[in-house]
Every structure is written in C-alpha cells, then in structure tokens.
Amino acid sequence: MNLVQSKSSHTSIALIGNPNSGKSTLFNSLTGLHQKTGNYSGVTVDKHYGSYKHHNVEYQLTDLPGTYSLYPKSIDEEVACKALLSSSEKIDVVVIVVDSSNLKRHLLLATQVIDLKKPCVMALNMIDEAEKNNITIYKEELEKLLGISVIATNSRNKEGIKELKEAILNAKVSDSIFYNFEKQKQLFPNADSYEQIITSQFSIKQTNSELIKGFELADNIHRFAKINYIVAKCIKQPEQLSKSITQKLDSFFTHKIFGFAFFFLVLLIIFQFIFYVAEYPMTWIEEGFTYLMNLTATSLPQGQFNDLIVNGILAGISGIVVFVPQIALLFFFIAILEDTGYMARASFILDKVMRRFGLNGKSVIPMISSVACAVPSIMSTRTITNWKDRIITILVTPLISCSARLPVYTLLISIMFAGKQTFLGFNYQGLVLMAMYLLGFTAALLAALVLKRFLKTSEKSYFIMELPVYRKPQWQTVAMLVFDKVKVFLFDAGKIILAISVVLWFLTSHAPSNSFDTIETKYNKIIVATNNDSIKTIYEAQMQSEKLEASYAGILGKKMEPVIKPLGFDWKIGIALITSFAAREVFVGTMATIYSSGDSENTETLREKLIAEKNFETQQPSYTNAVCWSLLVFYVFAMQCMSTLATTYRETKHWKWPAIQLVFMTGLAYLSSFVIYSVFS
C-alpha cells in the first residue's frame, strides 16, 4: 500500500515503541501544539492524539502507550496491542520508534510489529546518542533486512522530521518474515498469519493460555536468532564502550547513600522555590484581585447582584487563581525531573525501600507522580503486574500529597509563618511544606506495611526498568506540560469552584424567615447610638458574624460542629470540609466566599482575614498554631476527593476498595488531627 495513491484526506498513524525510546518527544515534534488528550474506548488509559499536514494531507497521530512486546504483561501494554489491532480505529501506518543506542533491545517489538503486515516506518531515534558512543548503523542494510524505510531522527532537535513525514507518505508493507512459522502451524493450524496469533491471545480460553506462552517463548528464541544476525550485519560499535557520562553520573545518583541524600536535596530545593519564587507573582495576583473587587464593589449599585459578583464569583476565583504560580512551579520541576531522566533514577534508588513495605519498585512512579495528582497515578498502576502490589499501591497512593492540597498547605503555613523566618538559611514555610509531603509519603509506606499482612497472593513481584540516558530538558516539552496542567487546574477545578462559590454565596447570604432583619435591627440601634468609629466597626463585624451564623450555611455548619470541635475546627471550617470533598483545593475558595459574605466593601486578602479572625467568645485569634497544624495534618491524610474514589472503583471494578480507602483515610485523618490539636493546645 502506497499512501500517495490513498484517496483518504485523513491518514491514521500510530506511534509505537519501548518506554524511554523518545516516542512521546517525537510525537510532540510531529504535532506541535495540535494535540489533545483523551481516553481509549472502554478504559481510562491516557490517549494522546494530534495532527499535522503534509502535502495537503491531514495526518492523525496516536501515541500508543509504551510496550516491550505484543504479548502484554500489563494493562498499558494490552491497550497498546489492542489499539494496534483495532478494526474500529483502522491504522494506516505504524511508526516504530527505536532507541539507536539500544537497537538490539528494541528490535524485538519492531520485528513483531512488522510481522503484523501493516505499512510501517522505523524512526531510528536518538541518533545523537549512538554517534556519541561511536556506534555506526548501516541504515541502507537495515532497511533491506527489515523491508521498510528507516529514518534517522533526533526528536529533541527535530532532526529527520521532514524525512520521516516523507517516509510515512510512502510507507509500505514489509516482505520480511521474522516469526516462527513452523511453530505457528504446529500450535495454531488454523491461523493464517502472525496477526491472528497476536489477536487470539485476547480471546483464547484461560485453560489454553499456556499455548500462547509456549508459542511466545519459541517465537522469541527464533526471533532473537534473526535479530542477532541483523545486529551483526547492520551495527558496528567499539568492542568495549568507554564509560559514558550517564554511567559516571549514575555512580553518584544511584549510590545507596549519596543517591538518597541528593534525592532529598532535590525535594528541599523544589519546596523552597515554591515559596520563595512564587511569592512575588502570588502577591501581584492578590493585589490585582483586590483592586478588581474594590472597583466592582464601588462601580456596581449596592445590592444582591453586587454581592454575588464580589463575594461569590470574584472571591471564589481569586482563592484558586492566586495559587497558579505554585502549581506551575511544581509541574515545572516534575517535568524537568522526567525529561532529564532523573525520575527513573528516583524510582530505582527507592525500590529496595518499597520492597520492605510490601510494594514493588514499579509502585514508585505512581507514588511520586501523586505529587501532581492521584487520579492519573492510580491509573498508572496498570504497569504493576502483581495483583497484591497493585491493590496496595492504589489504596495508599492518595496519601501522597497532591497539587490540589498545595493551596490548602500554602494558606495555612502562611498564617503560621507570616514573616520570612529562616532556619539554617532555609525558609520555614518551605521546610514545613516539605514536612507535609514527607509525612504523607511515610504514612503511605506504613499503610502499605499493614495492608501487606492482610492481602495474600501467590504471585511473585519483580521490578525491571530501563534507565534512560541523561539529557538536557526539552523546554518546549516542559512548557507544554506546565501549560496543560495549569489549564486543567484552572478550568477543570475552576468550574467546580465557581459553581460551589455561587451556591455558597447563596447559602451564606440568605437565612430562614426574617433572621437577617432581626439581627440588623438589633445592631443598627447600637451603631446609630454610638459616635465612636472604632466601636462602630467592631459592632458591624459582630453583626456580619451573627448573620453568617444565622444563614443556611451557618445552620449546616453548626450541625456538624460538635463532631469536628475536638479537632479545633469551627462551623466555618466544617462547611469548607464538606465542599472540598468535590476537590481538595475548593477549601480555599470556600473560605474566601465565607469570609467575604455580606461584606463587599472589605476586600482584604483571605490570609489577612484569617489572621485577623477572632473567636467570638474568647476574643483570641481563631487560627492558632494548634488549629493550623491540626488542619494541615487532617488534609495530609483525609480522602477529600471524589475523583480519586471514582478512579479507584474504575481500576478495581469493586466498591469495596474505595470504601476501604475512604474509611481508613478519614479515620486516620480524624485521629491524627485530634492528637495534634491536643498536643499543641
């Protein structure tokens, strides 16, 4: 099939390759900004797809999940294999992405894909790494033996992209055969092609699964014999490769002592940056919203509409937008760690630690990724083949502090440490923030240790990971990831926050019967009778506080206050706890709405309002260190996220596991918060 003769104006292309082959970077180079993220049909595995135009033909690209073989050992690999064979999403061309410096290892998957007899092109990616190692690849000979076009590419610098597009245009089906034909006829006499064997493994009865395993083993032995011949004919490399920069760096970064020390130093630097650097843009955003709220409050006629705009919508939005700089910085560092190859090293050095707690080394990546969000992290546990390890990882992953908790942490820490207090040159705020993340990670490990004793399985767990070479971060990729994550944070969370803010505004601005009128009549008499402006201000504040308490929101909060009072929480915090179950970051927007209710002229920042908040009975600050510590610890452990519970259900296919998750995390949060408040009080 030659695509020049294709009448279709939309050509479907799939990118397939081993993990760490540079496949996703190549996808970005081909599509640029013309890409989207969705889900594969029937599953929640991320589907990255995009498009580009070449010779007036629009090409639709799908970046398949990384896989080592067409005999899948994990859910991600199964999705990649099924997508390649799908009849509903017909693929016109397959681009096989291989690492030029590890070609022999990548040829197993490549020869399997070629044997499916689909039009193929090979992207000989990371060609610069092969050249650095004095590896010579005879491309013409490789094309001859594989029977497809082979294009040398360096996706990070966009080298070879134009040539690759031309090769895709002229892609053809290979005449070469690499599979064990005799074994196929022996075990599968009715199979006419290798594709039928691959397809059959998804429908074959469990009792015959050994048949597939037997064929896979025999086929791999047969296939590697041919791969060894290809390597001998097409690759020339020094007999003994000199010690590369990657190996030299790994001697330090993966060291059993220095590796851990560097890992914690990296974390410390990240959290210091999140407070030091983000402080300036956060201040600008706060000042901008304060100005906007003041302008709106004075420009619009006084009344319900003014109050809705200022205290409902703007107060709620400002409570989340102000944390965008910190969210952007967090994802910026995560993207750099992934793009440079260090994240894989972090997984490697933590593997031994994880095993002591009954987890697999493959659990490290989901747990580290949870610093961003628990939802995709739980989905990424599909790479864990051991059932017990996977279930434990799913259950404990939400204990790792995610970016949604960051606004809550930041708000409370800034109340406790309002100034630039330092310890040994490090900012207290950054140290406390790091402590919250370490507390969550420690709790996850201890919870895994407990679950290890209750869950039983006969499966053996193993950890195999190919460490990528160290590379300079590709700033375009980093920028796209940060932009995408911030956009999700703003718009996905923003929709929830805006809706809840409006509902909360109504609940805080309205009350049963004539409760507000009675309170206003009571205080107006006192306010009119006094000539002292400072006393008037105090009475006006008390009036607003009583009105809030008498509102529908106040009534709801008062009903749950006896349950949370032992933790140091009042009814206002109680309302925020309820609403933040939709999404943890909603806590801040809820507090902003509550503390702006009915007072459109007071547009101080939320931090200033909480610091100034006084207990009505004792006239002491409401947000003491004991309350803030208690609330911090509560949010470290609490399951305040419906999306996480829903994802746990989708991944386990049983309500038992999210129920266990909810009960044990909520119980742990309540008990820990109670102990902390009792100690600090």
Image: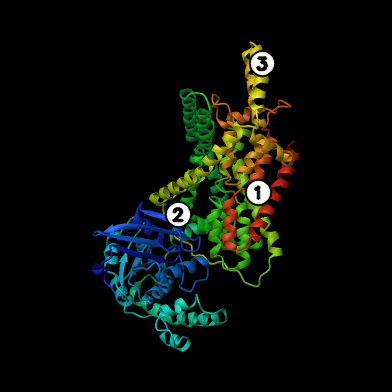
Please state the horizontal and vertical placement of residue 225, each as a whole percent of the image: 42, 81
Hey, which quadrant is residue 15 in on the image? bottom left
The residue nearer to you, when weighing 530 against 24, is 530
Q: What's the residue at 48%, 33% (across, down)?
A: 285
Hey, which quadrant is residue 566 in on the image? top right
Which residue has dot 1 on it?
A: 637
Q: Which mark is residue 525?
A: 3
Going from the N terminus, do you reach mark 2 or mark 1 first?
2
Q: What's the residue at 67%, 24% (across, down)?
A: 518
Q: In this view, which residue lies farthest toward the front? A: 513
Q: In this view, which residue lies farthest toward the top? A: 531
Q: Nearer the viewer, mark 3 or mark 1?
A: 3
The residue nearer to you, when weighing 533 against 556, is 556
Please state the horizontal and vertical placement of residue 206, each as a whole percent of the image: 56, 78
Q: Give the secondary structure at mark 2.
A: helix
The residue nearer to you, when weighing 372 against 596, is 596
Q: Amino acid at mark 1?
A: Phe
Specify whether 56 is left or right of 350: left
Characterize the local packing of mark 3: few (<14), some (14-19) or many (20 or more) Cα atoms within 10 angstroms: few
Q: Give the secondary structure at mark 3.
A: helix
Characterize the local packing of mark 2: few (<14), some (14-19) or many (20 or more) Cα atoms within 10 angstroms: some
Q: Amino acid at mark 2?
A: Thr
Q: Nearer the viewer, mark 2 or mark 3?
A: 3
Where the C terminus falls, by quadrant? Answer: top right
Where the N terminus falls, by quadrant? Answer: bottom left
Residue 470 can be seen, yes or no: no
Please state the horizontal and vertical placement of residue 159, each as a whole percent of the image: 31, 58
**CA–CA distance between discs 2 and 1?**
31 Å
Please state the horizontal and vertical placement of residue 415, each as a whole percent of the image: 61, 33
Q: Which mark is residue 141?
A: none
Which residue has dot 2 on it?
A: 340
